[in-house]
Image (cartoon, rainbow, N blue to C red):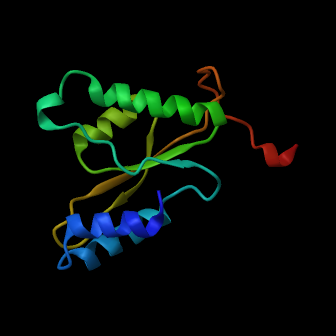
Amino acid sequence: WDESTLEAQVRAVVGEQDWPTYVRCSEMAAQARPAGPHWYLYLLAVAPAGRGGGLGPALLTHGLARADAGGLPVHLEATTTRSRDLYSRHGFAVVDVLEPTGPLPRNWAMTRPGRRPGGSHGVVPDRSES
């Protein structure tokens, strides 16, 4: 994806009136991200008719396997307590609570440590020290 195309699409959904609030929330979220290389899960959603059947966890597991192949941490913001709890069950920990003003809800910035390829749950050592 290219950043300008993504911004235009998000801006169309958010609307011009709420765009400044969205930008402030995005800036808050960026401050909670890991400093080093990491995967960022921007959006994971399941249509209401498809919820409750395991589709969300299956999508998440598929994406996490890709991140595990590179041994990188994964970061996201959970926007509901239900999603926060789902991500916690998949190894994410809350690193910050974001309290935006206006119409946006509380968000939980969450990071999952890097894992070794092959599914090991150990944290990947910092390769810069080698």
| Residue at horizontal 65 percent and vertical 55 percent from the top | 36
In the image, is 99 to the left or to the right of 116? left
Please give the count of numbered marks on the rendered protein.
Answer: 0
Q: Is residue 127 above or below residue 117?
A: below
- Which picture quadrant has residue 115? top right
Q: Is residue 104 among what the camera can see? A: yes
- Is 3 drawn above or below residue 127 in the view shown? below
Q: Quadrant of residue 98?
A: bottom left
Residue 54, given in percent of the width and then of the height, sits at: 27, 22
Q: Position of residue 122 (x, y in %)?
A: 64, 27
Q: Is residue 53 above or below residue 97?
A: above
Residue in the picture at 36% in, 25% down: 58
Direction right: furthest residue = 130
The residue lying toward the viewer, choosing from 88 and 19, is: 19
Q: Residue at x 65, y 36 (%)?
A: 70
* Quarter of the image that includes the C terminus: top right
Q: Position of residue 5 (x, y in %)?
A: 39, 66
The image shows residue 28 at horizontal and vertical percentages of 40, 68
Residue drawn at point x = 63 percent, y = 20 percent: 118
Residue found at the very far left of the displayed protein:
49
Q: Is residue 99 visible?
A: no
